[in-house]
Amino acid sequence: MSVHEGRLAEIADEERPGGDPDYLYPDYRSTERRGPKSPLLILPHTLSETTGPVFGESAVDEFDADLTRQHGAEPLGERIVVSGRVTDDRGHPVRNTLVEIWQANAAGRYAHHVDQHPAPLDPNFTGAGRCLTDADGRYRFVTIKPGAYPWGNHPNAWRPQHIHFSLFGRAFTERLVTQMYFPGDPLMEFDPIFQSVRDPAAQKLMVSSFDWETTTPDWCLGYRFDVVLGGRAATPLDRE
Amino acid sequence: MTLPLTPSQTVGPYFAIGLSRRPEHELVPSGSDGAIVLSGTVLDGEGAPVPDAMVEIWQADPSGAYVAGFGWARSGTDADGGYSFVTVKPGRVEGQAPHLVMLVFMRGLLKPALTRVYFPDEAETNEADPVLAGVPEEQRARLLATVDGDALRFDLRMQGEEQTPFFTL
């Protein structure tokens, strides 16, 4: 960290504390031309940094939290419930925050024109969901387990099964986009995106756990994924 | 005792499925009173446009207040790396010059890049802004939008000599 008169302090990205990956991680090739290389300037915490958008019920439609009921029939695949709690770093619930997910179908194919993996699309699966957390910070999605799929990063590269998560939390500057993985997936060890998080303890925070509590008899398996967002002081918009 | 934070991962190439389902790039209706178009191009380290980025903004209302139900928008980039918002100029927040907070996400970016956008017609307030004044002088102009016809333009350069200044907390 360097300090000049009147200047914002700077910090090299790789010296930032915490479990986030560095911008540059050579094993994930796309970082080479896209990750910022200059030192980062450290912002003071003004209202611009400590506030964030608040979403209401209008942000969510009826079937947004059930990805198996968005079309005329059910999608193929293993039906699962993914649920968990969103908290700050003191364990306090982050209430009424928007959680968005997107994922591949059971065959490992995204309903996106760029995805050319020769696996079948499922006319009954879009793979997108949204919900708001409740007063205790809890969210719940019904979906199907996504398949693994190949990608072009290196020869025989495969992404582990994962669900993309986007969360807002209280402050826009603490917005989180991450990926939820499944316990025991052998591909995590070989995946540069998962491995870009270097600390094994931090890696574990991205892996869901199998959950008997939400596993429903004769219906579906449950996975639990809790999320901890940056815990800066509560903002003026967080009065409830 | 605090809990460790959940780490960030890239949005990857397919985020449009989940994050661009609804048009969310207009804070105010296009053509309405005071509406400003803010657009720009996202460029990688070789100067090539990034066609699969997502840009989000967060801003105060014209009075300088952060209020529920206003101030956030997002835009994916098109085949030419272009993003676009329709917004209004925010007021001053805690004495700072009017500015937007901007986050950019993309495949190859393992966590979002955070920057600010200032306004070109605010020479005096920009001069006195504590954040802008704290940015190395040769980089300050890169945080100012430029006038582009009826619109404002703000390009995001991820790397290189002219890299956009990025922040952390």
Image (cartoon, rainbow, N blue to C red):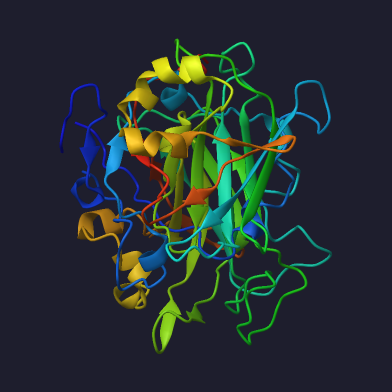
Residue B40 in picture, x, y percent from top left: 61, 47
Q: Indicate the quadrant containing the N terminus of chain A: top left, top right, bottom left or bottom right.
A: top left
Residue B167 in picture, x, y percent from top left: 36, 38
Look at the picture and state if B29 lies above or below B10.
above
Which of B136 and A232 lies nearest the eye of the viewer? B136
Q: Quadrant of residue B39?
A: top right
Residue for point 59% across, 64% down: B14
Residue for point 84% across, 64% down: A72
Look at the picture and state if A167 lies above or below A203.
above
Q: Quadrant of residue A119?
A: bottom right
Residue for point 53% across, 14% down: B92
Left or right: residue A68 versus residue A101 is right
Kindly tell me whether residue A11 is visible in this rendering. yes
Residue B115 in picture, x, y percent from top left: 44, 38
Left or right: residue B83 versus residue A211 is right
Kindly tell me whether residue A214 is visible in this rendering. no
Q: Of all residues shown, which one is farthest toward the left?
A: A2
